[in-house]
Amino acid sequence: MSTGFLNPRQPWKGRRIVLGVTGSIAAYKAVAIARSLTSLGAEVDAVLTDGARHFVAPLSFEGVTGRRSLTDLFSVENSALHINLGSEADVVCVAPATADFISRASQGRANDLLSTTLLATRAPVLICPAMNTNMYTHPQTQENLKHLTDHLSYRVAGPGVGPLAYGENQGLGRMLNPEEIIEEIGRVLVSPSLLTNKVVLVTAGPTEESIDPVRFISNRSSGRMGFAIAQAAYRLGASVRLISGPVTLPDPYGIDLVKVNTAQEMLASVSEYLPKADVSIFAAAVSDYRPRSVNDKKIKRSKENTAYALDLIENPDVSLDTLGDRKENSITVGFALETESILENAKKKLKRKQFDFLVANSAAEVDAGFDVETNRVILLFPGGRCEEVPLMTKHEVSEVVLSHILQLLENRL
């Protein structure tokens, strides 16, 4: 199972994560979680209960983490293993967490390595339930989960709705997918932040302006930069609305995604949400023009091979036309993709649209800009200050952008 996490990066890089695995059929997903966390640069200690070993072998975790899997509470080698695990962990994540384990954790039981580690740690604890629908919705299970969140400040992620064990069909109780749990762990690692409970608006992707039922005007934007920013803002605790044009990317986890096609549709959606936004980031590549009229039938090729002219009119400028809708003291960030005179054009855009800062890059570089995984950008600030950001993944660029937003928030306290 591929989760798409390949390179070490923040906030997982260099962190110590205890991954608890209990006796559920969903235990096989925990191997993918351990592998992705390791790829992201974390040190992962897999702790398996006796029940977990009926579903997955400790060796599977050792193969993807490079670290010994842990199963026994009592060990000649390390008699205080649970103390060491608990004190050294940055986060403890139990995935999957069965109804039995949730019950034992809520009672403070300490009868195996994982439960004793929970008592020994002061790190954040993330519980990812996985069980039959009736077991999850049972009042006792719900009371146990409430005790964990209300009295112990544990976080609960999921469950989702989907296929359960063989013969159970679809239902509530399915453990979140590995990539979703990775994001939840990331959110735990960076919270609380100055973006916690803030409202963030992000635009992303291209827009499409119809010519006829089968043709349209658009651009090469993939939406990757905007999606990465939205996900990074979610990890920092924000409530995120992402307004995206047509893209082929999977829907981001934990984010309110609004899909639009045209520049006018994007303008309407931005105008609706912008007055609530504490931070707005305009990363979409909105088409500058649209056909004055749209043919209701496919335009046929001329038999005489004559030229065909499109009558184009200007589209709304989403970030400029919504200036008056912005929340007082909110932060706004713009993007500028240029093919020439990058700094000159970006400075004009920064001033015209009154952004707090602007992210500029070139469309002429093969390893940056549209439809690639990496980007090389320049940050421009009012007053003339510029900061060059070297080539890095768009996920890493998103962290740079969010770090400057956090600094602006701190300065306004």
Image (tube, helix red, strand yellow):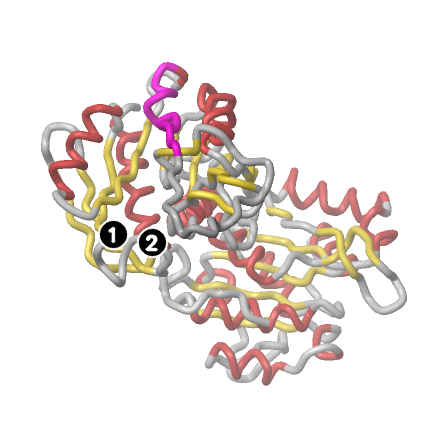
In the rendered view, does 132 fall on the left or right side of 206? right
328 or 45: which is nearer to us?
328
Q: Is residue 103 visible?
A: no
Q: Amino acid at mark 2?
A: Phe
Q: Residue furthest front?
A: 304
Up-down: is 353 above or below 379? above
SS assignment at label 1: loop
Work out whether mark 1 precedes mark 2 in sequence or the reverse, and give the earlier one: 1
Q: Which residues are magenta?
A: 311-324
The residue lying at 41 percent from left, 35 percent from top is: 195
Quadrant of the rendering where the C terminus is positioned: top left
Q: Amino acid at mark 1?
A: Ala
Q: Position of residue 182 (x, y in %)?
A: 52, 58
Q: Is residue 320 magenta?
A: yes
The residue lying at 78 percent from left, 57 percent from top is: 99
Q: Quadrant of residue 108?
A: bottom right
Mark 1–mark 2 CB contact (< 8 Å):
yes
In the rendered view, does 291 fall on the left or right side of 99? left
Q: Is residue 134 magenta?
A: no
Q: Position of residue 169 (x, y in %)?
A: 86, 60
110 or 68: which is nearer to us?
68
SS assignment at label 2: loop
In the rendered view, does 110 fall on the left or right side of 345? right
Quadrant of the rendering where the N terminus is positioned: bottom right
Up-down: is 373 above or below 354? below
195 or 360: which is nearer to us?
360
Q: Position of residue 79 (x, y in %)?
A: 54, 76
In the rendered view, does 138 fall on the left or right side of 378? right
Q: Quadrant of residue 409?
A: top left
Q: Which mark is residue 363?
A: 1
Which residue is under mark 2? 370
Q: Is residue 80 visible?
A: yes
